[in-house]
């Protein structure tokens, strides 16, 4: 599957296209099929996202998982600071990242 | 240390307001990211893996307690409670919001700090010896020269759009603690027949094409140094490869045309530059130098009580001789076992600031090895400093040992990285946690980069580790034999790479080979240079 990611313009937070808007949770990411380029141009133009790009992802029961390690690290947060990730209370949250 | 005059303050304040307006226009949609990106980079603001990252300049690594407290305050107010000290003697914050950045920069400007020229194809923060003004072996204080170069290079109109970024280091000791010859320009202050001048090296660097800077001039008189550096830059600015980013650094130019031809062109340009009168009048240099006058040393020469064994180890490892009787140089390790190299919490930054104020004439230094130095501590105060550091978990006695690892942020933070650096550093430090074992191995400089850009200085590691991406999987190459010191050398790849645990095992095997082959006081690198790679390769690859 193809999903879209970028950063929030003001805060810089990593975000994922949900089909309707942008979420900080990769689990919310929607498969954009062949429409990724058109969506990112419209969304970047409207400043709802900064520096967006299309990536490959794998569908899992827990939701989409980026295919490349770099985007998996982006999806959760630094692997060396679990307290700063999106799921600091869940020590197993990052097991799929590496 | 140097204090801003009205001109310094005015240009920094003006830049903050200019950037405030640019941010406002970007957020309002009046500028695209393509238009805005070069402007934010000129102010040290990157977009990294998780958020915006701000790199704050610490000129030649020197700052006072007031500035250090503000760095802690920024970590709390604008970031997530910590900062990362870098190999350029700067500090980076990893979680900055664009909308808050102008206010942050205004708070920095209030204490004579900024993030200008910490990115972009310009002259970056001038780096120097972290022991400047305190080292027992220095022939002059390099800081006035570093400050002069800082002022000269700040907003230099001719050098704001160079072919590529440009890094300058100034040292004044035979022992090179600043990796001087791995800079675009390295200057070593020397005396010839009692006259002060500089040996000038040009065209060093790490990155994908590591090179040791050749000596371009063995002695440039002090009063000509600025003109000479200007000439070096002018030749580069004219002929540097703007057509290919991978060949755009000055090291490629010097290598391609040869040191002799580059030297000839610089000499020709220098003769012209000398007619322009850019060297400062003596009175101006004296004004700058006066800021670096030695503090009012008054402590008696008392040897500290070594009865506490942990304190004694710290004294032996982290405390260095001072040029002033009764004083010592204290190195604060930011390399706790299992910690993140170079990271310090806001509370720890505050503790270091307070210690500087109370015990080090209000001065601190950031080192290129990602540690902090208190340059002027009276020997009578060493125990009190150590006790306070221990309370703040800052008393690791591992300076220059295998766990004193330089590591770039790697794939945990950096958008350029191919592999994570920090977990490898943590695993190696944990494997060698035993202090007796570390001290038995002696000086062993281990440096890790998460990509070929070499921010973790792996080329200059006695043992270097380079993280690469092998079909989406992290892989680590080992290099042996590098050095950033006066015995400068570039490490060589020893063979096929390893996974994360494999590279830790390989490092351990290398240390075992060293222990079995070392003679006398040989360090790891000395033994490696004497016996060559084969015995290490045999043990690691079988």
Image: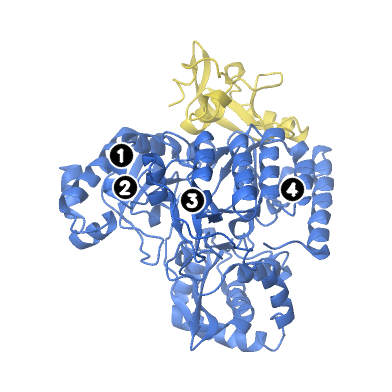
Chain colours: A yellow, B blue
| CA distance separating discs 3 and 4 | 25 Å
Pointer 1 residue: B503
Q: Tell me the SS state at disc 2.
A: strand
| CA distance separating discs 4 and 2 | 40 Å
Pointer 2 residue: B478
User: Which is more toward the observer, B337 or B25?
Assistant: B337
| CA distance separating discs 1 and 3 | 29 Å
Q: Which mark is residue B108?
A: 4
Q: Tell me the SS state at disc 3.
A: strand
Measured as percent of width and height from the top left, residue B274 is found at 66, 87
| CA distance separating discs 1 and 2 | 7 Å
* Res. B504 image quadrant: top left
Mark 3, other Cα within 10 Å: few <14 / some 14–19 / many ≥20 = many
Instruction: Say which label, 1 or 2, has the lower sequence index.
Output: 2
| CA distance separating discs 4 and 1 | 41 Å
Pinpoint the chain carrying mark 2: B
* Res. B520 image quadrant: bottom left
Give a yes or no on whether discs 1 and 3 share a subunit: yes
Mark 1, other Cα within 10 Å: few <14 / some 14–19 / many ≥20 = many
- Please identify, in this view, whether the residue under mark 3 or under mark 4 is nearer the observer: 3
- Please identify, in this view, whether the residue under mark 4 or under mark 2 is nearer the observer: 4
Pointer 3 residue: B331
Instruction: Say which label, 1 or 3, has the lower sequence index.
Output: 3
Q: Tell me the SS state at disc 1.
A: helix
Q: Tell me the SS state at disc 4.
A: helix
User: Which is more toward the observer, A56 or A71?
Assistant: A71
Q: Residue at x 46, y 31 (%)?
A: A69
Instruction: Say which label, 4 or 2, has the lower sequence index.
Output: 4
- Please identify, in this view, whether the residue under mark 2 or under mark 3 is nearer the observer: 3
Pinpoint the chain carrying mark 1: B
| CA distance separating discs 2 and 3 | 28 Å
Contact flag, marks 1 and 2 (Cβ < 8 Å): yes
């Amino acid at each position: 599957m193809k999903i879209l990611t970028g950063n929030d313009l003001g805060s810089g937070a990593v975000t994922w296209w949900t089909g309707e808007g942008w979420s900080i949770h990769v689990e919310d990411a929607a498969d954009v099929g062949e429409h990724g380029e058109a969506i990112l141009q419209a969304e970047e133009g409207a400043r709802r996202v900064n520096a967006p790009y299309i990536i490959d992802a794998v569908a899992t029961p827990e939701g989409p998982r980026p295919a490349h390690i770099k985007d998996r690290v982006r999806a959760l947060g630094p692997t060396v600071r679990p307290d700063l990730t999106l799921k600091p209370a869940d020590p197993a949250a990052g097991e799929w990242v590496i | 240390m140097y204090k801003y005059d009205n001109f310094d303050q005015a240009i920094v304040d003006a830049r903050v307001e200019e950037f405030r307006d640019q941010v406002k226009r970007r957020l309002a949609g009046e500028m695209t990211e393509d238009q805005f990106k070069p402007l934010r980079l000129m102010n040290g603001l990157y977009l990294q893996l998780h958020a915006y990252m701000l790199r704050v300049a610490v000129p030649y690594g020197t700052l006072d307690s007031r500035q250090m407290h503000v760095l802690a305050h920024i970590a709390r107010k604008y970031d997530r409670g910590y900062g990362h000290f870098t190999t350029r003697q700067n500090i980076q914050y990893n979680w900055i919001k664009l909308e808050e950045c102008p206010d942050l920069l205004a708070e920095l400007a209030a204490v004579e700090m900024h993030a200008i020229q910490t990115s972009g194809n310009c002259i970056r923060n001038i780096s120097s010896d972290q022991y400047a003004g305190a080292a027992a072996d220095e022939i002059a204080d390099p800081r006035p020269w570093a400050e002069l170069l800082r002022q000269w290079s700040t907003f230099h109109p001719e050098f704001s759009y160079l072919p590529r970024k440009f890094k300058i280091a100034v040292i004044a000791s035979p022992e090179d603690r600043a990796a001087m010859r791995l800079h675009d320009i390295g200057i070593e202050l020397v005396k010839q027949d009692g006259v002060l001048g500089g040996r000038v090296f040009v065209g060093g660097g790490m990155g994908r094409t590591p090179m040791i800077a050749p000596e371009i001039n063995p002695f440039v008189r002090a009063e000509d140094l600025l003109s000479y550096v200007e000439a070096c830059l002018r030749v580069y600015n004219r002929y540097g490869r703007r057509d290919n980013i991978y060949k755009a650094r000055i090291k490629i130019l010097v290598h391609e045309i040869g040191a002799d031809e580059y030297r000839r062109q610089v000499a020709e340009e220098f003769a012209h530059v000398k007619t322009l009168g850019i060297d400062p009048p003596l009175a101006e240099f004296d004004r700058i130098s006066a800021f670096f006058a030695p503090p009012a040393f008054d402590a008696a020469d008392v040897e500290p009580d070594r009865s506490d064994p942990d304190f004694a180890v710290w004294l032996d490892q982290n405390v260095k001789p001072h040029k002033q009787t009764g004083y010592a140089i204290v190195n604060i390790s930011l390399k706790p076992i299992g910690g993140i190299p170079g990271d310090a919490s806001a509370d720890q930054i505050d503790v270091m600031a307070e210690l500087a104020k109370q015990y080090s004439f209000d001065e601190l230094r950031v080192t290129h090895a990602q540690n902090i130095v208190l340059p002027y501590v009276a020997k009578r105060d060493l125990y009190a400093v150590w006790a306070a550091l221990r309370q703040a978990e800052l008393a690791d006695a591992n300076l220059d040992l295998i766990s004193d690892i330089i590591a770039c942020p790697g794939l945990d933070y950096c958008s350029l990285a191919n592999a994570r650096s920090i977990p490898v550093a943590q695993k190696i430090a944990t494997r060698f946690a035993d202090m007796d074992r570390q001290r038995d191995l002696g000086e062993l400089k281990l440096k890790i980069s998460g990509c070929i850009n070499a921010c973790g200085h792996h080329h200059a590691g006695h043992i270097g580790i380079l993280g690469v991406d092998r079909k989406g999987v992290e892989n680590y190459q080992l290099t042996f034999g590098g050095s950033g010191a006066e015995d400068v050398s570039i490490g060589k790849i020893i063979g096929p790479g390893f996974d994360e645990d494999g590279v830790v095992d390989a490092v351990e095997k290398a240390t075992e080979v060293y222990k079995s082959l070392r003679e006398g006081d040989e360090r790891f690198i000395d033994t490696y240079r004497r016996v060559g790679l084969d015995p290490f390769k045999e043990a690691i690859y079988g």
